[in-house]
Image (cartoon, rainbow, N blue to C red):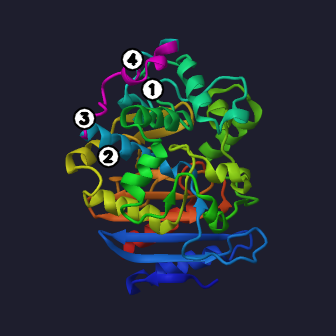
């Protein structure tokens, strides 16, 4: 399948590898963007944005990128830290008194951003029916008891991360957190990243489909088996209560959902543009960027059930897990989304990389499609 877009001649092999993905008849559509500094060296797209294959993928097609948005929320919080409205090591409950319930009085923003808060999941009952009600969900979260003492273990806050950081932004800045991110990050820099798509843009949204026969790496298979068979395991609750699923990509409530840690609709160019903007110092200071990308936690994550390494709201290259490698060197940082989307960067080489797809794979961490493209792009650079 022939890709549309632009690419430097040095990236011809990357473009060809991207096109070859669509040799699999299960593939629907996707996009790829790589930037070096502010220069776009490749920005291509191909396939269809509907399930029937009738609607071509366009430059401005939006794809559900799920948790790829977590670093946006982190940077928004760090902007408020630099403004003196938030502090990393002051208890969340200082800004949000109700949050102290259930033994959570010592959780700090740093704990939440490094996924060591001890509140990575919500226990039953089922919260899916009320997940679109912000006030209800933050009240539930405020009342939820700790799973473990803050700072002692790793546990990825699949959805809790977005509600905690989002509520802190709302209480200290006054704006809805997704409005803050739009006003201060995406809109001023022309980034096609939407945290709650406006109705007139619904026609631009691509629809997900699950690929069959892709089993994923051993960690991913183990996690999927656990989620299916153990309904009250902490991992199952983290991913399903409430849950994210490619099936939600057809629901207008999900399109409009404003949850700054779990739901986003983006182009590959918009995501790569976020990282190039960040690396250029146009969002936070160099000192704060160093804090953001510094290792804050490293070990076996109780939610992912695999070794993970985190900065402040970003996933970092984990040498202990080659199946999760960015394939662009040891200092990369960024975030994955459910089913295959990813965006990350390397500050030393000023590389920004993003891959988006609507064909959901089976890897819970970095998808092999993105790994192959990243490795080729790295070689071209």
Q: Position of residue 81 (x, y in %)?
A: 28, 37
**Could you say which disc has been placed on residue 347 in the image?**
none
* Circles 2, 1 touching at the beta carbon (< 8 Å): no
* Circles 2, 4 touching at the beta carbon (< 8 Å): no
Which segment did they paint magenta? 83-101
Instruction: State the residue position of label 3.
Output: 84
| Measured Cα–Cα span from mark 2 to mark 4 | 24 Å
Residue 92 to residue 358: above or below = above
Which SS class for mark 1?
A: loop
Residue 342 to residue 22: above or below = above
Q: In the figure, is residue 159 to the left or right of 127? A: left
| Measured Cα–Cα span from mark 1 to mark 4 | 9 Å
Instruction: State the residue position of label 4.
Output: 106
Q: Position of residue 109 (x, y in %)?
A: 37, 30
The answer to which quarter of the image holds residue 203 is bottom right
Instruction: State the residue position of label 1.
Output: 117
Front residue of this view, candidates 65 and 132 = 132
Residue lying farthest to the left in this orientation: 287
Can you say which quadrant of the picture contains the C terminus?
bottom left
| Measured Cα–Cα span from mark 2 to mark 1 | 18 Å
Q: Residues within 10 Å of mark 4 (few under 14, many from 20)?
A: some
Q: Residues within 10 Å of mark 2 (few under 14, many from 20)?
A: many
């Amino acid at each position: 399948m022939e890709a549309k877009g632009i690419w430097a001649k040095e990236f011809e092999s990357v473009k060809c590898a991207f096109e070859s993905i669509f040799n699999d008849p299960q593939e629907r559509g996707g996009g790829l963007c790589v930037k070096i500094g502010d220069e776009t060296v490749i920005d291509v797209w191909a396939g269809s944005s509907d399930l029937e294959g009738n609607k071509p993928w366009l430059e401005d097609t939006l794809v559900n990128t799920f948790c790829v948005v977590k670093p946006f929320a982190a940077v928004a919080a760090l902007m408020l830290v630099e403004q003196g409205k938030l502090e990393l090591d002051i208890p969340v409950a200082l800004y949000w008194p109700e949050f102290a319930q259930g033994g959570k009085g010592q959780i700090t923003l740093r704990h939440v951003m490094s996924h060591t808060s001890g509140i990575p999941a919500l226990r039953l009952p089922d919260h899916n029916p009320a997940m679109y009600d912000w006030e209800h969900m933050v009240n539930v979260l405020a009342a939820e008891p700790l799973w473990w003492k803050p700072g002692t273990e790793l546990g990825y806050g699949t959805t809790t991360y977005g509600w905690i950081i989002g509520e802190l932004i709302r209480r200290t800045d006054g704006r809805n957190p997704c409005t803050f991110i739009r006003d201060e990050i995406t809109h001023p820099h022309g980034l096609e990243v939407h945290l709650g798509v406006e109705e007139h843009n619904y026609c631009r949204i691509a629809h997900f489909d699950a690929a069959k026969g892709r089993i994923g790496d051993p960690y991913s298979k183990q996690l999927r088996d656990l989620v299916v068979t153990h309904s009250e395991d902490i991992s199952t609750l983290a991913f399903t209560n409430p849950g994210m699923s490619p099936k939600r990509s057809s629901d207008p409530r999900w399109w409009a959902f404003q949850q700054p840690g779990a739901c986003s609709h983006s182009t590959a160019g918009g995501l790569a543009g976020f990282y190039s903007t960040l690396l250029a110092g146009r969002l936070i200071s160099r000192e704060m960027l160093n804090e953001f990308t510094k290792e804050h936690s490293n070990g076996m994550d109780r939610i992912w059930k695999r070794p993970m390494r985190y900065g402040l709201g970003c996933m970092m290259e984990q040498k202990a897990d080659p199946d999760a490698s960015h394939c662009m060197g040891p200092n990369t940082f960024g975030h994955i989304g459910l089913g295959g989307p990813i965006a990350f960067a390397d500050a030393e080489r000023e590389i920004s990389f993003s891959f988006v797809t609507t064909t959901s794979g089976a890897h819970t961490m970095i998808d092999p499609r993105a790994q192959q493209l990243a490795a080729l792009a790295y070689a071209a650079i």
